[in-house]
Amino acid sequence: MKIASIETFSDEYVAMVRVRTDDGAEGWGQVSPYHADITAQIVHRQVAPYALGKDAMDIDALVDDIPEKEHKFPGSYLRRAMTGLDTALWDLRGKLEGKSVCELLGGTPRPFRVYASSMRRDITPQD
């Protein structure tokens, strides 16, 4: 199963990545936030060229290979862009195997407390 397309949907704050395979399966991921629109450009220019046509299930090889090939590009934006590909491929694999990503990584899904922050200081904890 080969990666056939990588798309991004972004604004300044968030960018989602959709990976589709040659057999029509798809997975969704997200790049690291903060100027996510810039990071989406890095996905297309410096991540996608190395991922297109590759085995969608060989996630480790991709996340090792891309930084090696882009070794002269500043690390932060490249890594932030790679998170979109990485999380989309894990989502794809989880869908195909009928498991959560937690299970794929050897964990056991369970309820847990979460914390949400807007990073704005004008919202109370109750909000």
Image (cartoon, helix red, strand yellow):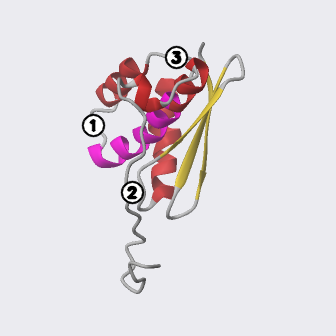
Q: Residue at x 27, y 32 (%)?
A: 71
**Drawn side of residue 3 relative to residue 43, left or right:** right
Query: What amino acid is found at the position of numbered circle 3 in the picture?
Result: Lys
**According to the image, label 3 marks what residue?**
54
Magenta part, dominant SS: helix
Q: Position of residue 101 (x, y in %)?
A: 46, 30
Q: How crowded is mark 1: few (under 14 residues within 10 Å), some or many (20 or more)?
A: few
* Quadrant of the rendered image containing residue 61: top left
How packed mark 3 is, by other alpha carbons closer than 10 Å (few <14, some 14-19, many 20 or more), is some
Residue 124 percent coordinates (x, y): 40, 83
- Judge whether 112 appears above or below 114 on screen: above
Badge 2 amino acid? Val
Q: Point out residue 24 in the picture as x, y percentages from the top left corner.
A: 72, 22
Is residue 55 shown above or below 7?
above
Mark 1: secondary structure = loop
- Quick one: SS at disc 2? loop
Residue that mark 2 sits on: 114
67 above or below 61? below
Instruction: Residue 28: give x, y in percent of width and height.
Output: 58, 38
